[in-house]
Amino acid sequence: MTSEPHGTSRHTVGRASTVGHRIRVPKMAELIASDLRRQIVQAELHEGGLLPPEANLMNQYQVSRPTLREAFRILESESLISVRRGARGGARVQLPTNAVAARYAATILQYHGTTLEDVYEARLVVEPPCVALLCETRTPETLRRLRQALAEHDAATAEPARSVRTHIAFHSLLIELTGNQTLRLLMELLEQIIDMANVSQVESTAGSPAHERASRKGLAAHHRIVEFIENRNPEEAERLWRKHLSEARDYLVRADVRTVLDLMG
């Protein structure tokens, strides 16, 4: 029978494992946060409702108040609860949202000095195949909602600020109508940044010939893409949308705003 190498034990938690990794034991606060997080995402705890009183949770988990409050801070940092102190206070449940994830992703991109070209390149990878997918899966309701969005965009052409909002909404609608939740989340991570670039550019160029030309071309592309979707033409739809997004990128990226940090400050 072979013995364990000197200084090691199969029963030692936190020592080097057989694959060369250390095992980290989660803190009790992290375990409590994980359990409460699971209850929130599985709708066992409902949006707007209060968590049980601290005394009850301390008894349930057999922990001290500081440990429980550390768990609360973890969940609060994830925007899954909001904590109000005082006699009428408590921890109230909030549902996880794509917007929270998008804000966090934008912060990470700022930290890494990510360029706007990098963000637009990711958009070019994701969004054109989505319109091709819509050509395959579209329904009468899909077409109704797209035509309604076009009508709203047509009605806003004389108002730059309103027009850019309808333009942004149309792009979001295309992703939503795929019905793919993963794609929706991925694009929302990018769209927060891209939408800010749109608004920033409109504010600086509204009324200029370049802005008018970009607006006309963008609206024409929106009308054309709906025709391709209606006629179930995925190849032409994807080709047109890639061209449209490339032109939008060239228009929106400015010399004074090169990175996500430049844009979001």
Image: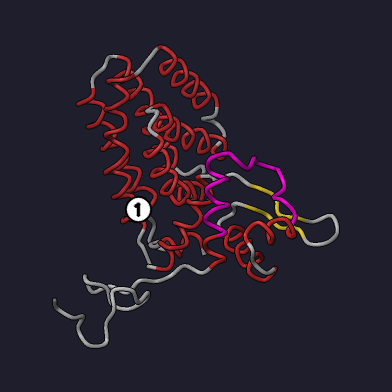
Q: Residue at x 29, y 21 (%)?
A: 135
Question: Residue tagged by mark 1?
Answer: 119
Quarter of the figure with residue 185: top left
Residue 27 location in percent, x, y?
51, 69
Q: Give SS at disc 1.
A: helix
Amino acid type, mark 1:
Val
* Residue projecting furthest to the top: 140
Q: Residue furthest left?
A: 1
Q: Position of residue 77 (x, y in %)?
A: 58, 61
Q: Residue at x 38, y 45 (%)?
A: 186
Q: Is residue 189 magenta?
A: no
Instruction: Specify the farthest residue to the front.
Output: 1
Q: Is residue 198 above or below residue 232?
A: below
State the image quarter where residue 181 is shown. Answer: top left
Q: Is residue 42 magenta?
A: yes
Residue 182, horizontal then vertical, whole percent? 38, 39
Looking at the rendering, the stretch of residues picked out in magenta corresponds to 32-53
